[in-house]
Amino acid sequence: MSIVINAKELRATLPDVVAKVRRGARFTVLYRSRPAFQVVPLDAPDEDREGLESDPLYRAKAVGRSTDGRSASEHDAVLYPA
């Protein structure tokens, strides 16, 4: 789970953020109210890919047809890059 902070808060509390990241915390930093980047420990596993096979949305069957002529596997390559 990621802690959400804005860029101003990151600048103001950088030493505290660094200490928390060293203990394993993850931060999502907002810039102009939109997610801009994450601050994570260097040895952290890729959280976005963990448990992907058990994600019910990822495992769901197709519910529509592509209007751009691409196959489901081509769309997966865009949505879930390696």
Image: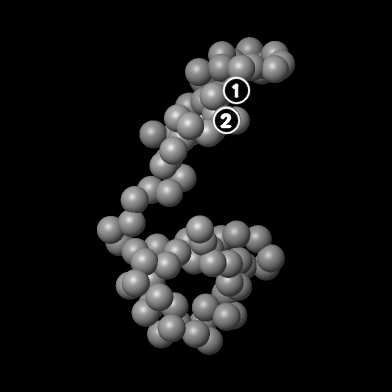
On the image, the x and y values in percent for residue 77 come to 48, 27
> In the picture, residue 70 is in which quadrant?
top right
**Residue 44 location, x and y as percent?**
33, 56
Indicate left or right for 36 with 24 as reference. Answer: right
- Height in image: 62 above or below 8? above
Specify the quadrant of the image occupied by residue 34: bottom right
Asked if disc 1 and disc 2 are in contact, CB closer than 8 Å, the reply is yes
Give the structural element (helix, strand or loop) at label 1.
Answer: loop
Any part of residue 18 in sight: yes
Tell which of 47 and 12 is nearer to you.
47
Where's residue 69, x and y in %? 63, 13
* Residue 71 found in image quarter: top right
Q: Which residue is mark 2?
A: 56
Q: Position of residue 14 (x, y in %)?
A: 45, 82
- The quarter of the image holding the C terminus is top left
Q: Circle 2: is it few (<14), some (14-19), or many (20+) Cα within 10 Å?
A: few
At 54% from the left and 67% from the top, the residue drawn is: 3
Closer to us: 24 or 8: 24
Considering the numbered disc 2 on the image, is that residue within a helix, a strand or a loop? helix
Q: Which residue is mark 1?
A: 60
At 57% across and 30% down in the image, what residue appears? 56
Callout 1 amino acid: Ala
Q: Residue at x 61, y 17 (%)?
A: 61
